[in-house]
Amino acid sequence: MTTEDPSKTCPYICPTTIKPAGETISYLEAGMSRGPENPHASPYVPGLIQPPEKKIYPPGAPPRYLPQPTDSTSGDILGMGPIGPWAPGHIDWTPHAGTTGVRPVVDKYSITRYSTGEWRKNNEYVLTPRATDKARNWETTTKKDLANAFSGMDNKLADVNNKLEKRVKDLSHWKREVEKAVLAITDEINVLDQDRGRLKGACRILMLPEAISRECLELRTNRYEPDLVRDDAEQELIKEVAIVGEIRRVFMDTLAKVEEQMSMNKAAKASIEFDWSDKMVSLKLDTQNLKLSPDSNLLLWHPGVARWPENATTLEYWEHFCSESIRNCEEVRQKSENLRGDLMTAIVKGSQDMKIQAERTNAALAETVSATEELCEKLEETLKINLQQLAHIENLIDELKDSLRKVDERNKLVMTRLHARNYDRPNVENCRDEAQYALMAEAKFVRETCESLSGKLREAEIIRSDLMKYRGELEKQIACKRKSLNIDLDRCARVRAHMPTPEEFAAG
């Protein structure tokens, strides 16, 4: 063990001397006295008690209950010996007098906690009018603070009213702009809906020219065999059907774009209407707030409102949102307006193309009809000539037959003469005289004539047959051409008279 520094230890609690080995350490029990070890204690001697001495205070000293110049501020050193049944001890009167370890000795009768000087100082502290002075100063300061507070509140109220008035003006301005955008997009939706109705009507009307073209093609399939040709009219009708299909494709694509644009217009209208509704609510609230004053009867307590809301935005973002909302709506409206221009262009141009193609088809049909009519007239003229020639051939055949009958009579005459001369003349009379040679020559000539006339008759019969056949062909061709004329000139023309005009397409 090491010896501790005596200046840093308590000689009555921590002994500085080391106990020899074998010696026991005994501790005092509660209530026992340390005895004469206390240097402040003195042994009692009879006659030690002196009569009381009168305390003398210097002139001008404060009252006895207030601190005196002779008071010690470090505490009284009380010499307490073994006079009573309590333990003596040194009491340190310091600001830490109430701290555990330095508190005074406690006996069974009382506790000595404060010194007389502390008692007088406490009396001075109690008698000092701190609260009154403080109240007087506080009253002056408070009145000044109240005047400043109400002046500041009036200034703040005026500033807030000015800001609210400016805010109301800004809201009114943007509300008017938003209302213009709402009216514009509403009008655009109505006009686009009307144009969409026109486009749907044009799609329905487009079924009529397609049906007319297909009906004409179907009717022209009823022509007879020689006239089943792919002429210019047929080509134009096929092209007309193709043009109708292309126009329908353009109409349907445009209609799909219109439907998509209508959805975009409605979405833009809903968005701008929401913005308009929000601005109306905000304008109403700010107008009502601007009308409020401290004397209003609508004022209520709303604890916890003096904070920024979670969804609060900045003024820059608000202005950006207002302008962007109107700009987006205007962009959608402009896009819709451009689409309406394309829509009407498609209807007008498509109807004009249909009209031009119909005119081309009608011209081709008219040319075909004109050519067919000329051909039909030529066929009828040819048939007339053929009939006349057929009549001539038939008359010639009758003459040939009469001639053959006459030749037969001549032949029978020659044969009869020759038979009579050959078989009826006797013996030497049956000679080859000149008459016999003449009869033989006549018989040969008659036979040759008969054969020639028979050949002519056969050729006439063949020619008549050919003329009859040609007559049938001519009559068939005339019937075919009349059928074609009936189809092209009557039925197709009657059907194509219902071809819609561009005005009907534009009207929907």
Image (tube, rainbow, N blue to C red):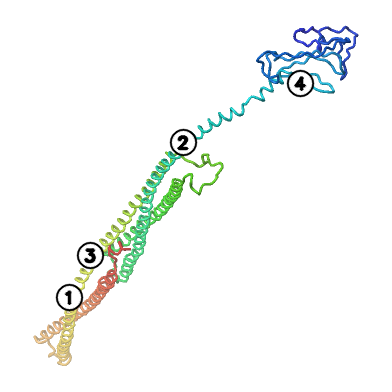
Q: Amino acid at mark 3?
A: Ala
Q: Secondary structure at mark 1?
A: helix
The residue that label 1 is drawn on is 381
- Say if mark 2 contacts mark 3, CB within 8 Å: no
Q: Amino acid at mark 2?
A: Ser
Q: Nearer the viewer, mark 3 or mark 4?
A: 4
Q: Earlier in the sequence, mark 3 or mark 4?
A: 4
Counting from the top left corner in percent of width and height, residue 238 is at 31, 62
- Marks 1 and 2, Cα distance to the nearest angstrom? 122 Å
Q: Amino acid at mark 1?
A: Glu
The residue that label 2 is drawn on is 151
- Say if mark 1 contacts mark 2, CB within 8 Å: no
Q: Nearer the viewer, mark 1 or mark 3?
A: 3
Q: Secondary structure at mark 4?
A: loop
Q: Residues within 10 Å of mark 2 (few under 14, many from 20)?
A: few
- Marks 1 and 4, Cα distance to the nearest angstrom? 161 Å
- Say if mark 1 contacts mark 4, CB within 8 Å: no
Q: In the picture, residue 409 is in which quadrant?
A: bottom left
Quick check: 140 left or right of 482?
right
Q: Amino acid at mark 4?
A: Arg
Q: Nearer the viewer, residue 213 or 161?
A: 161
Q: Earlier in the sequence, mark 1 or mark 3?
A: 3
The circle drawn on residue 113 is 4
- Marks 2 and 4, Cα distance to the nearest angstrom? 54 Å
Q: Secondary structure at mark 2?
A: helix
Q: Nearer the viewer, residue 440 or 151?
A: 151
In the rendered view, tell whether residue 248 sits above or below residue 272. Answer: below
Q: Earlier in the sequence, mark 1 or mark 4?
A: 4
The residue that label 3 is drawn on is 363
In the rendered view, tell whether residue 286 sits above or below residue 212. Answer: above
- Say if mark 3 contacts mark 4, CB within 8 Å: no
